[in-house]
Image (spheres, helix red, strand yellow):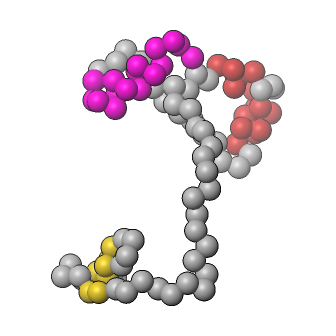
Amino acid sequence: MSPKARDLVIARIHHQETAITPYTLGFEGDVAERLDEYYGSARWRELLDPAIRWVTGADLSVDTEGLPLPPMSTAASGGWIGALSIWRSRS
């Protein structure tokens, strides 16, 4: 990765033109392994230079099983307003 990758990402977030477009590339399932087989090795992976890195974080999920539902009210837009979000009703 070039030493300016962070600056490129920040510039693009601010909608500024850059000579290189920063990217991130992910694969689902066994796609990377199939590409390894197609190219004959995993060397192609070394040629990728993603400017955006994925990091893991804390598990912030909450187990709500058994908790009472928050009070809800009908919104003028035809949805339901709950404690955490707005749900649109199906029309």
Count of marks, rendered view: 0
Is residue 91 visible in the rendered image? The answer is no
x and y, in percent, of residue 8 in the image: 40, 21
Tell me the quarter of the image containing the C terminus: bottom left
x and y, in percent, of residue 39 in the image: 75, 26
Q: Residue visible at 33% across and 73% down?
A: 86
Position of residue 9 in the picture relative to residue 47 (left or right)? left
x and y, in percent, of residue 32 in the image: 71, 38
The one nearer the camera, 86 or 64, is 64
**Residue 18 placement: quadrant:** top left
The one nearer the camera, 86 or 51, is 86
Q: Residue visible at 37% across and 76% down?
A: 83
Position of residue 90 in the picture relative to residue 44 (left or right)? left
x and y, in percent, of residue 62 in the image: 58, 68
Tell me the quarter of the image containing the N terminus: top right
**Residue 82 placement: quadrant:** bottom left
Magenta segment boundaries in residue numbering: 1-16
Asked whether 15 falls inside the magenta stretch, the response is yes
The one nearer the camera, 62 or 46, is 62
Is residue 33 visible in the rendered image? The answer is yes
Position of residue 27 in the picture relative to residue 78 (left or right)? right
Position of residue 33 in the picture relative to residue 48 (left or right)? right
Farthest residue to the top: give it. Answer: 3
Asked whether 79 falls inside the magenta stretch, the response is no
Residue 73 position (above or below residue 16): below
